[in-house]
Image (cartoon, helix red, strand yellow):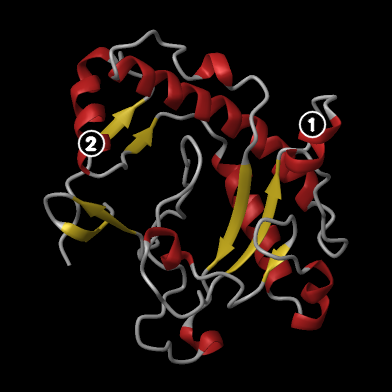
């Protein structure tokens, strides 16, 4: 499969010359690549290593943290079928996830009960909590930088989006895509995570360097490998 033609936007550069590429990418693919984001690579690697230790625990241990979709905890293999999000019926996804979300209360009991519940942190990997909290602080800053870029690309004021994101309702998933030695042969049409469109304002995806598998749908080429 060919690679999708997607621009790489350098957040350390003047955004003005890059705005046409941002606009085209989001109209034709809904996806772009960013560099110069400044998120600590050591922190990203530490989260992966710690989460991998959790995912390799026995299923009976992980089951103590099992939640339904939308909850805060462990989503085991088969818990989701993301293809349904964009209208494709697929067998259940083979991935596993640790899911966290915003938990800083607003003071409005009805809002807090729906969107700002406490996260569940696995006791077996106590180092995960401080790593994730440090990472989310950096990702909040990065998300706002990306949203400022998108507002500018629309021809609006820079804070067109970020004037509304002071206390966002966000989700954060650490996804593990196990190999076939663990999953066995997939069913026809089964994916580690099925084709889908994310809900929310913007998704920032941190892909592990050197790992393939991510594909993007573009108007020009259909499903293609992400560069």
Question: Is residue 8 visible in the rendered structure shown here?
Answer: yes
Q: Residue furthest left?
A: 220
Give the number of the disc on residue 27: 2
| Circle 1 Cα neighbour tier, 10 Å, few/some/many (<14 / 14–19 / ≥20) | some
Q: Looking at the image, is 45 positioned above or below residue 76?
A: above
Q: Position of residue 201 (x, y in %)?
A: 48, 35
- Give left or right: position of 62 versus 177: right
Q: Secondary structure at mark 2?
A: helix
Q: Position of residue 57 (x, y in %)?
A: 75, 76
Q: Quadrant of the N terminus?
A: bottom left
Give the number of the disc on residue 104: 1
| Circle 2 Cα neighbour tier, 10 Å, few/some/many (<14 / 14–19 / ≥20) | few
Q: Residue furthest bottom?
A: 185
Q: Secondary structure at mark 1?
A: loop
Question: Is residue 53 visible in the rendered structure shown here?
Answer: no
Q: Looking at the image, is 54 positioned above or below residue 101?
A: below
Give the number of the disc on residue 213: none
Q: Residue at x 24, y 20 (%)?
A: 19
- Give left or right: position of 185 versus 78: left
Q: Contact (CB < 8 A) between labels 2 and 1?
A: no
C-alpha distance separating marks 2 and 1: 34 Å
Q: Position of residue 159 (x, y in %)?
A: 47, 12
Q: Residue furthest front?
A: 110
Q: Residue at x 57, y 19 (%)?
A: 164
The quadrant where residue 168 appears = top right
The quadrant where residue 153 appears = top left
Q: Position of residue 212 (x, y in %)?
A: 35, 63
Which numbered disc flags the more N-terminal residue, 2 or 1?
2
Q: Looking at the image, is 118 positioned above or below residue 83?
A: above
Q: Nearer the viewer, residue 200 or 9?
A: 200
Q: How many discs appear?
A: 2
Q: Residue at x 47, y 42 (%)?
A: 203
């Amino acid at each position: 499969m060919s690679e999708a033609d997607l621009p790489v936007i350098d957040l350390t550069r003047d955004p003005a010359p890059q705005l046409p590429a941002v606009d085209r990418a989001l109209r034709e693919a809904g996806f772009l690549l960013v560099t110069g984001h400044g998120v600590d690579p050591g922190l990203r690697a530490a989260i992966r290593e710690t989460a991998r230790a959790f995912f390799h625990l026995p299923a009976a241990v992980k089951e103590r943290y099992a939640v339904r979709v939308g909850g805060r905890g462990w989503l085991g293999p088969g818990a989701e079928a993301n293809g349904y999000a964009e209208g494709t019926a697929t067998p259940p996804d083979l991935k596993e996830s640790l899911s966290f979300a915003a938990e800083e209360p607003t003071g409005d009991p009805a809002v807090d009960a729906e969107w700002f519940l406490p996260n569940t942190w696995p006791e077996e990997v106590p180092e995960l909590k401080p790593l994730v909290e440090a990472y989310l602080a950096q990702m909040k800053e990065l998300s706002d930088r990306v949203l400022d870029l998108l507002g500018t690309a629309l021809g609006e004021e820079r804070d067109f989006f970020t004037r509304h994101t002071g206390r966002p309702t966000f989700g954060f998933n650490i996804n593990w895509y196990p190999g076939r030695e663990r999953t066995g042969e997939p069913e026809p049409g089964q994916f580690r995570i099925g084709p889908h469109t994310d809900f929310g304002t913007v998704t920032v995806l941190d892909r592990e360097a050197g790992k393939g598998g991510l594909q993007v749908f573009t108007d020009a080429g259909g499903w293609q490998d992400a560069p």
